[in-house]
Amino acid sequence: MTTHLHRLSDELITIRDFLRWGASEFLAAKLYFGHGTDNAFDESEQLVLHAIHLTPPLADEWLDARLTRAERERVLENLQRRIDERIPAAYITGQAWFAGLPFVVDNRVLVPRSPIAELIKNRFEPWLTKAPQQILDLCTGSGCIGIACAYAFPDADVQLSDISFDALAVAEENIQQHNLFERVFAIQSDMFHNLTGLRFDLIVSNPPYVDAEDLADMPDEYHAEPEIGLGSGEDGLDFTRSLLLQAVDYLTDDGLLVVEVGNSWVALAESYPDVPFTWVEFQHGGHGVFVLQAHELRDARERGLL
Ligand SMILES: C[S@@+](CC[C@H](N)C(=O)[O-])C[C@H]1O[C@@H](n2cnc3c(N)ncnc32)[C@H](O)[C@@H]1O
């Protein structure tokens, strides 16, 4: 099929040409970038290189290599889909990177992008003082957070859980892909419902937290993602409120809770003025992640602050 991009691309020859041109077309089409990249050039690079079986960053000396006809076709198809369908690039390539690791993704899961990756790389220091043995990634989606934790803590067992069977199928694929099936497990559960009796040294969660107003205003690319992974009531905090009440029952005495709430952090801090949230400051971007120790949660609950 001769597409708009095909007609316009006759003069393009090298990888560099396609990278630059893809970025220009993306900007002209006013695409949104926020699912693993934050600009048109990186987005173009991801899609062009995927089509020729290479991964970014590409060394400078390769940039002026020519593409074969078949490669041009695949590159153009990727670029055209990104413009026509307005879906995240990761749904076209079927792959996303998180904490330096590759994950299989499709539209059954959100595209991994949590700033929690930085905390994992730092092994949750200074809040965790010893390596956790039992870890829970609650609301796991693709499994990216829990699986990255399994790399950071090679002696730990990791439970991945999600309400969505569809998401868990993707998480299972990633467990296999990373060869971690002996110590990373996936279980379906509505929050803690199927986790009764278990205790974790570390519970990490990137739950749905987008408020109704933000949800309505989101660019098309977000609407390609499962809505159950984004919205959580009028102020985005329905899930997090229940989590705060229950989490201590699933933490060991010196356990740690780490939760992302994104832009809803303002509403959360206002709703619970006396809860001693520690809001993480990130070096590589991101915000809206809090840390609470088990004893802080217990104390807050006993004092009726939750
Ligand atoms: C924001 S996505 C995060 C996915 C993944 N942790 C990541 O960072 O890419 C939230 C996930 O929470 C799941 N979820 C929504 N409600 C839930 C509930 N009540 N119990 C467990 N999981 C839930 C969704 O299916 C979705 O996969």
Image (cartoon, rainbow, N blue to C red):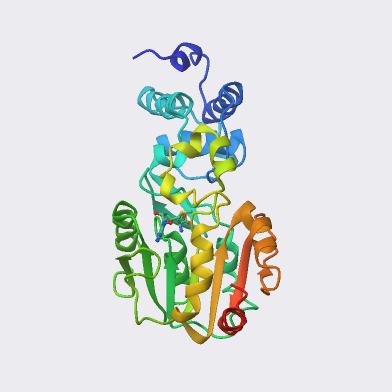
Task: Find residue 125 and report its horizontal and vertical position in percent.
Answer: 62, 76
Q: Is residue 287 at least partly visible in the picture?
A: no
Task: Find residue 46 and report its horizontal and vertical position in percent.
Answer: 50, 39
Left/right of residue 166 with respect to residue 131 in the rendered view: left
Front residue (pair 59, 106): 106
Position of the N terminus by quadrant: top left
Q: What is the quadrant of residue 33 in the picture? A: top right
Q: Is residue 275 above or below residue 94?
A: below
Residue drawn at x 58%, y 35% is: 217
Task: Find residue 166 and report its horizontal and vertical position in percent.
Answer: 30, 51
Q: Is residue 26 above or below residue 132?
A: above
Left/right of residue 242 with respect to residue 289 in the rendered view: left
Residue drawn at x 49%, y 66% is: 242
Residue drawn at x 68%, y 75% is: 276
Q: Is residue 128 at least partly visible in the picture?
A: yes
Which residue occupies the extreme front position in the image? 304
Front residue (pair 211, 219): 211
Task: Find residue 181 and report its horizontal and vertical position in percent.
Answer: 29, 69
Position of the C terminus by quadrant: bottom right
Indicate the quadrant of ligand 1 in the picture: bottom left
Residue drawn at x 41%, y 61% is: 140
Q: What is the quadrant of residue 163 in the picture? A: bottom left
Front residue (pair 127, 102): 127
Q: What is the quadrant of residue 197 in the picture? A: bottom left
Front residue (pair 262, 90): 262
Left/right of residue 275 with respect to residue 92 in the rendered view: right
